[in-house]
Image (cartoon, rainbow, N blue to C red):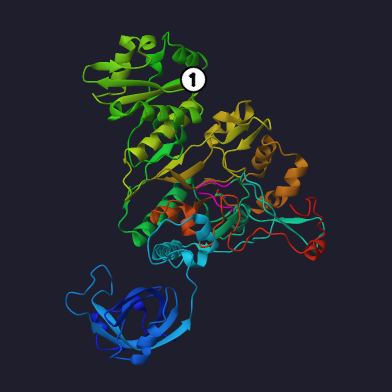
Amino acid sequence: MLKSHPCGALTIAEVGQTVTLAGWVHRRRNHGGLIFVDLRDRSGLVQVVFNPAESEAAHATADRLRAEYVVQVTGEVQRRPPGTENPALATGAIEVQAQQLRILAEARTPPIAINEEVEVDEALRLKYRYLDLRRPKMLANFILRHRLVKAIRDLMDQEGFLEIETPILNKSTPEGARDFLVPSRLHPGCFYALPQSPQQMKQLLMVAGIEKYFQIARCFRDEDLRADRQPEFTQLDIEMSFVEQEDVLQLAERVITAAVRRVCPQKRLLSPFPRLSYAEALRRFGSDRPDLRFGLELVDVSDLAVGSEFGVFSTALAEGGVVWGLKVPGGAAFSRKHVDELAEIARRAGARGLVTLVREAEGLRSPSARYLGEGRMAALAERLALAPGDLAGMVAAPLEVAAAALGSLRSELGRRLGLADPRTLAFCWVVDFPAFEWKEQEQRWDAVHHPFTAPKPEDLPLLEGEDLSRVRAAQYDLVCNGHELGGGSIRITDPELQRRIFRIMGNSEETVRRQFGHLLTAFEYGVPPHGGIAIGIDRLTMLLADAPNIREVIAFPKTQSGTDLLFEAPAPVDPAQLEELHIRLAVPEEA
Ligand code: ASP
């Protein structure tokens, strides 16, 4: 090794020892003939002093050092002179008196500052990701990620699970996204699909008798990217045999709780994780991924709106909708502009508008007072528990729209009013999802989770009817602080039922045979009851690291448009490569 110690690990215990260090020049200062260098490696920083009285040659070389030069230093560890200690630094009690200095590599001035916390344009950070990752804050994210995954692997092992790798090149498994395709050279005109998840593989491993499988699995989905989406991402993928829903939830809860406590003991966990049905989550929080760190629950005021002359209310109710409200503590003090912004958020979620009601010391006030009438205003204020100084926002709309509008409003208010404690991880389970959703454009039913999800046994008779929206699935989502962290289900193991579900989703016999024949055949050879879950490692790390998005916890992430700015991928390829793959491009050369 070119070094005897990590820079950041030196303490007064090493005083008097001669050490050899190697790393990057974090900072360099000249002070009255002495040169001070903060030397950085992965472990942290240490101060190195170059004194011409100690070594003329080392001092002269140190004069040439610039930020990010790579150097090797040999010297003696000494106590810092009294009054010059730096308690903010782990090694702040000592310094190294340099005797020898060797420059291992010079460095151009980095385009992004590594030794100070300044806002840097993200495109620049991604283009020079190897420099961005040198920043201590980014390094900390990857140390955390490593520890998390290590803890998960150890815990899964203790629970009796086997980690088994599944192929990246295979046939598509539907997870509701578009596939990434890889052309086959050996089979002209044929393609592999990158796995949207190892769903069918892990089910086949259950047929194979593995009983408890897990994998830190890479998944690929070609969908439009949002803040916490990437085209490739990592999941803790789990499948278990001979289980019911409750067994999967408890296993996942045990592992996640223990892993988080191990790597982030400073975080507060809600334990046990509360359970909410999908319907309850919508009714109380307006979202199937509620942030439970704060209250602000939605209130159903539909019954108080019945019989109102107010067109906004009466029309919505006549159309089978609801009137729901949300109390904003202290909202009476909001400016007109602020209230307009809240109404705009509701509108963006599909509501026609926001009906507001304010309680002041003197009484109730509302722009819609004329239509609401005094008696109804009083009843609404009482139901919403408005105290003087509070404001209520109400939405009259179809249930899903009212939920979406007030759910967005609730999240926004949670942020603006600082209601969510950043140290708390409020995990919860959302269960009893609807099994199917109607795809208006395609005029067909689709699985809410995926087609392998079992309907709840008590809802099976509903499959006979026309309206499948009432069929519930043995599906569960793991939610934390307003993010969907993962989901899973108990699977269908009856080949006949599985065929029927494929048909309901509009697949022809031929498609089912071609795409899922292997699975249906496997189920004819003795399939154990099984279920599983997948939990997003990127999102979980993001929450533990208090990072604003998942790109901060992925070493080489892609931009919102799916490009890698460092490699400049995707990129055109050599025509000879295309030829080999039997591919002719339909796009113009320049495109
Ligand atoms: N394959 C599912 C997913 O990736 C998870 C599961 O059902 O286990 O979301």
Residue named by callout 1:
321
The answer to whether residue 134 shows anywhere in this view is yes
Q: Secondary structure at mark 1?
A: loop
Classified by dominant secondary structure, the portion drawn in magenta counts as loop
Locate the N terminus by quadrant.
bottom left
Q: Position of residue 369 (x, y in %)?
A: 35, 13
Residue 452, horizontal then vertical, whole percent: 61, 45
Q: State whether residue 323 is above or below residue 194.
A: above
Residue 95 percent across, percent down from the top left: 27, 80
Residue occupying image coordinates x 37% and y 88% = 58
The quarter holding residue 206 reads bottom right
Magenta residue span: 225-231
* Viewer-closest of 455 and 485: 485
Q: Residue furthest front?
A: 32
Q: Quadrant of residue 310?
A: top left
**In the displayed structure, does residue 180 sit left or right of residue 151?**
right
Relative height, residue 376 to residue 84 (above, below): above
Residue 277 against residue 421 in the figure, above or below: above
Q: Nearer the viewer, residue 296 or 251?
A: 296
* Residue 136, quarter of the rendered image: bottom left
Q: Residue at x 39, y 57 (%)?
A: 545
Disc 1: CA contacts within 10 A as few (<14), some (14-19) or many (>=20): some
6 to the left or right of 87: right
Q: Residue 326 in magenta?
A: no
Residue 278 in the image, given as x and y percentages of width and height: 46, 35
Q: Nearer the viewer, residue 69 or 367?
A: 69
